[in-house]
Image: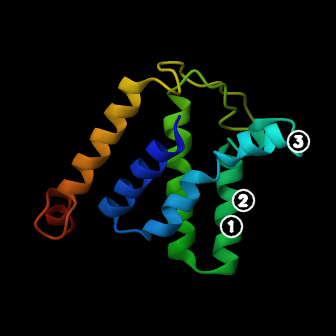
């Protein structure tokens, strides 16, 4: 999955749920660092960062360094990224080290149609959640 697509999807979710956008986008980009760490050498297995265990770990770090809301935003962004990755052919151990889930294998990570669909869905979600006049804003009241 393209990191920009993951970041945009997480950003739109943060707008809809009224979370901290910065920490949601940062949370969405952390799993993408696994490829950088694998290719540069220090990390041998990408399952370490592409799992819910890591999402909880990074959210706990953010919680202790900042506050609960930013931790919730980080976890949401991380989860959005993992959700999108689990739909692709990427073999991600979502529940590492407890159970091996290897993804649904519905799309290629770089499939332009899938990425365009996610980007379009994100834009629609941001439009619907815009202020109190949007659909999601009216559901909150």
Q: Quadrant of the C terminus?
A: bottom left
Determine the image quadrant of residue 139. bottom left
Q: Position of residue 84 (x, y in %)?
A: 49, 36
In primary-sequence order, the first of circles 2 and 3 is 3
Q: Position of residue 120 (x, y in %)?
A: 28, 39
Residue that protrudes farthest toward the left in the picture: 133
What is the total number of numbered labels drawn onto the structure image?
Answer: 3
* Residue sitting at x 34%, y 41%: 119
Residue labelled with disc 1 = 60
Q: Nearer the viewer, residue 71 or 90?
A: 90
- Is residue 101 depicted above or below 49 in this figure? above
* Residue sitting at x 71%, y 49%: 53
Q: Do labels 1 and 2 touch, CB within 8 Å?
A: yes
The label nearer to you, 3 versus 1, is 3
For label 2, the SS is helix
Q: Is residue 104 left or right of residue 122?
A: right
In primary-sequence order, the first of circles 3 and 1 is 3
Residue labelled with disc 2 = 57
Q: Do labels 3 and 1 touch, CB within 8 Å?
A: no
**Label 2 packing within 10 angstroms: few (<14), some (14-19), many (20+):** some
Residue labelled with disc 3 = 41
* Residue sitting at x 49%, y 68%: 22
C-alpha distance separating marks 2 and 3: 22 Å
The label nearer to you, 2 versus 3, is 3
């Amino acid at each position: 999955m393209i990191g920009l697509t993951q970041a945009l999807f997480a950003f739109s979710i943060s707008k809809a749920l009224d979370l901290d956008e910065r920490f949601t986008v940062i949370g969405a980009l952390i799993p993408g660092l696994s490829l950088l760490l694998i290719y540069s050498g220090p990390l041998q297995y990408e399952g370490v960062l592409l799992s819910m265990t890591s999402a909880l770990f990074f959210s706990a770090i953010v919680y202790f360094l900042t506050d609960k809301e930013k931790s919730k935003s980080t976890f949401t962004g991380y989860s959005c990224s993992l959700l999108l990755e689990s739909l692709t052919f990427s073999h991600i151990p979502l529940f590492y080290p407890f159970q091996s889930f290897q993804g649904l294998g519905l799309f290629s990570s770089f499939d332009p149609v899938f990425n365009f669909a996610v980007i379009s869905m994100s834009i629609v979600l941001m439009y619907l959640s815009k202020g109190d006049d949007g659909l999601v804003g009216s559901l909150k009241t």
